[in-house]
Image (spheres, rainbow, N blue to C red):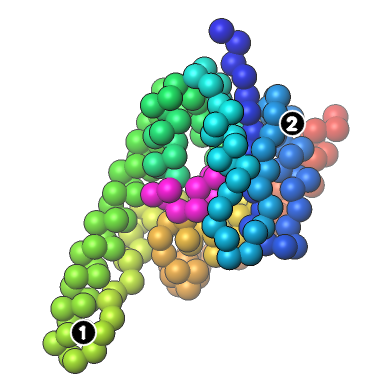
Amino acid sequence: MTEIRIGYARVSTGGQKLDRQLDALTAAGCRRIFADKKSGKDDARPELKACHAFLQPGDTLVVPALDRYGRSLKDLVNMVGELRARGVGFTSLHERLDTTTAGGRLIFHVFAALAEFIRELIVSGTREGLAAARARGNVGGRPVVATPEIIQAARTLLPNPEQSITSIAKLLGVSPGTLYNHIPDLQELREAGRAAIPAQAEAGTR
């Protein structure tokens, strides 16, 4: 059976354009591409819903980068899990993640474990923080701890100029300030990603 690749793109701010994402998906061999544009505070993504409805068993959903598909690690893990249950593959171009391969499935299992780990940290941290706050007569909680796994995941995502620091932090369940505090070479990673774009474009014209 011939694989049919379906693309999905999304921009989350008014100043972003879809062109680069659409070009990447077209180059990846997508027969049809669905794209959502910023819709203010509305979390509805009608094109994503249409894309999911269009997909058939044996198809592969292709996205430019993970944060263009999932808005959080939990969201990402849940949606890709649903695709797998339907017999649909998933590929993220920037991270070179392909769940139709053994290596890609292994990486995604790590993502799923990390999502559960973050969830447990949030639950545990919130409980402990609220207990301490009540003892002081205050209300509040504790932020998620920046684990080595979270920091490594962030370092992998930071060189991609399509992903903002805020979106990466949201995907991993931490604040942007946490990334700045725990990744001293954060700006260097961002600059390296931007510098790689002209080099990739030049290589593609040879």
Tell me, yes or no, whether the highlighted magenta stretch contains residue 74: yes
The image quadrant where one finds the N terminus is top right
Provide the residue designation for mark 2.
Answer: 26
Provide the residue designation for mark 1.
Answer: 133
Q: Residue at x 55, y 45 (%)?
A: 69
Q: Residue at x 47, y 66 (%)?
A: 179
Q: Residue at x 78, y 45 (%)?
A: 19
Q: Position of residue 102 (x, y in %)?
A: 41, 23
Q: CA distance from mark 2 to mark 1?
A: 52 Å
**The disc labelled 2 sits on which kind of residue?**
Thr
**The disc labelled 1 sits on which kind of residue?**
Ala
In the rendered structure, the answer to whether residue 204 lies left or right of residue 59 reads right
Q: Position of residue 159 (x, y in %)?
A: 60, 53
> Does dot 1 land on a helix, a strand or a loop?
helix
Q: Looking at the image, do the residues carrying marks 2 and 1 touch, with CB atoms under 8 Å apart?
A: no
Q: Which residues are magenta?
A: 66-75
Above or below, 136 relative to 71: below
Q: Does residue 10 show up?
A: yes
Tell me, yes or no, whether the highlighted magenta stretch contains residue 191: no
Nearest to the observer: residue 191 or residue 67:
67
What kind of secondary structure does the magenta stretch mostly adopt?
helix
> Does dot 2 land on a helix, a strand or a loop?
helix
Above or below, 174 relative to 158: below
Farthest top residue in view = 1
Q: Residue at x 40, y 60 (%)?
A: 173
In the rendered structure, the answer to whether residue 100 lies left or right of residue 9 reads left
In the rendered structure, the answer to whether residue 156 lies left or right of residue 111 reads right
Q: Position of residue 99 (x, y in %)?
A: 46, 28
The image quadrant where one finds the C terminus is top right
